[in-house]
């Protein structure tokens, strides 16, 4: 595999074009004279009032032959997190003999299905980045389809998390601003190693779903689901009850995960509601009888440990160093979760030995668990490049 060189830049300048030029120049300088083959751009604040100006600035500074990106509620880069206000993060890579192929996919409803056009085939790819609009693109359905069409290909990314002043989602593809669908990159000829770090910790025992329809669970282990959950919470220790009081989540075991159902083998979703008369609960994911469920709770200490551990494992797998990374953090992380600034971005910088990284706070994260790329909540998903 050929060597990859990565550069990043972040600007908080209030003018969209000037800020994009600043961030683009910083990313270009970090490439040490090599020409960028691909740029990925995350833009927040005033950039969403003039996204075309942002693209003009990036192209002026970098002149990348390929570019994707999206509007963001906040951006990460240079070891810092800009959770609010105006900021733009530019990630650029010189891929050597590697190849980056960008795409803009759109979806339309047919009588009984959804047709996706413009999606690059990922068969045989080394990995891919995907940045969908949460309102106009069927991300879950696409990921399920890719599990069959391109098994084992890691897809990492996040849902765009901010809208333009006109109310549309800003997706960037080349020199165009797209108001729907999904943009992404297929990578060939390079090593991309995915990382999914959970922001929630499992509590209580595993429970098997014995009756369910859609996203509603009627029975757990043959008993009304709500009764079983209430009893499980009553039996938790004091620390776990405190965590659950901050927000109860549900984890579904991912097929292909470890048989012990460890910390990283769950697809974590929010609890949408409960029907005390019927004894049912509803969660933010489709469910079926036979699936194994475990309660989860947001936990900053567990999230910190998990991100440390997951990054160290992958850096070791890459031979002790990485060229850089793209990061996608849940918008509920940051100061709200950790109580300090720059947690995820700072940890990335330290664990990667200062290798450049950039990303954004997403409305949902994408990354593989158990060999299948999935949509997540409360996670940090990362693409590390060798």
Image (spheres, grey):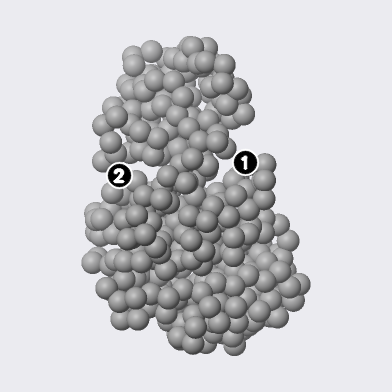
Mark 1 against mark 2, which lies toward the viewer? 1
Please tell me which residue lies in front, 217 or 304: 304
State the residue at coordinates (35%, 33%): 262
In the image, is 145 to the left or to the right of 92? left
Mark sitting earlier along the chain (1/2) = 1
In the image, is 58 to the left or to the right of 110? right
- What is the quadrant of the N terminus in the image? bottom left
For residue 111, what is the image quadrant?
A: bottom left
State the residue at coordinates (41%, 27%): 294
Residue 79 spot, x, y in % from top left = 59, 60
- Is disc 1 surrounded by few (<14), some (14 to 19) or many (20+) residues within 10 Å? some
Establish if 334 lies above or below 215: below
| Disc 1: which residue | 337
Residue 16 spot, x, y in % from top left = 70, 76
| Disc 2: which residue | 370
Please tell me which residue lies in front, 60 or 307: 307
Q: Which mark is residue 326?
A: none
Residue 214 spot, x, y in % from top left = 40, 34
State the residue at coordinates (52%, 12%): 234
Establish if 122 lies above or below 294: below
Please tell me which residue lies in front, 358 or 255: 358
For residue 6, say whether it is visible. Answer: yes
């Amino acid at each position: 595999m050929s060597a990859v060189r990565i550069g990043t830049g972040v600007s908080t300048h209030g003018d969209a074009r000037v800020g994009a030029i600043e961030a683009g120049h910083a990313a270009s300088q970090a490439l040490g004279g090599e020409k960028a083959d691909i740029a990925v751009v995350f833009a927040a604040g005033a950039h969403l009032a003039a996204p075309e100006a942002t693209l003009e600035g990036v192209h002026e500074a970098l002149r990348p032959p390929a570019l994707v990106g999206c509007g963001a509620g906040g951006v990460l880069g240079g070891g810092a997190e800009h959770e609010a206000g105006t900021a733009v993060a530019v990630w650029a890579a010189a891929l050597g003999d590697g190849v980056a192929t960008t795409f803009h996919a759109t979806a339309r409803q047919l009588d009984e299905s959804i047709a996706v056009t413009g999606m690059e085939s990922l068969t045989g790819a080394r990995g891919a980045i995907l940045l969908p609009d949460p309102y106009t693109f069927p991300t879950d359905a696409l990921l399920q389809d890719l599990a069959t069409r391109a098994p084992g290909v890691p897809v990492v990314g996040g849902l765009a998390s901010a809208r333009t002043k006109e109310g549309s989602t800003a997706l960037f593809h080349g020199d165009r601003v797209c108001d729907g669908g999904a943009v992404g990159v297929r990578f060939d000829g390079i090593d991309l190693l995915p990382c999914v770090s959970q922001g929630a910790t499992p509590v209580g025992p595993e429970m098997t779903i014995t009756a369910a329809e859609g996203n509603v669970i009627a029975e757990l282990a043959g008993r009304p689901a709500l009764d079983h959950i209430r009893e499980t919470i009553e039996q938790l220790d004091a620390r776990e009850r405190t965590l659950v009081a901050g927000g109860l989540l549900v984890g579904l075991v991912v097929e292909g995960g470890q048989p012990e159902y460890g910390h990283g083998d769950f697809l974590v979703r929010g609890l949408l509601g409960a029907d005390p008369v019927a004894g049912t609960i509803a969660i933010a994911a489709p469910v079926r009888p036979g699936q194994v469920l475990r309660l989860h709770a947001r936990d900053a200490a567990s999230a910190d440990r998990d991100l440390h551990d997951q990054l160290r494992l992958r850096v070791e797998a890459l031979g002790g160093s990485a060229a850089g990374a793209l990061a996608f953090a849940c918008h509920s992380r940051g100061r709200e979760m950790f109580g300090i600034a720059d947690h995820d971005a700072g940890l990335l910088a330290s664990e990667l030995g200062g290798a450049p990284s950039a990303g954004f706070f997403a409305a949902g994260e994408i990354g593989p668990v158990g060999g299948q790329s999935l949509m997540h909540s409360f996670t940090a998903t990362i693409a590390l490049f060798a």
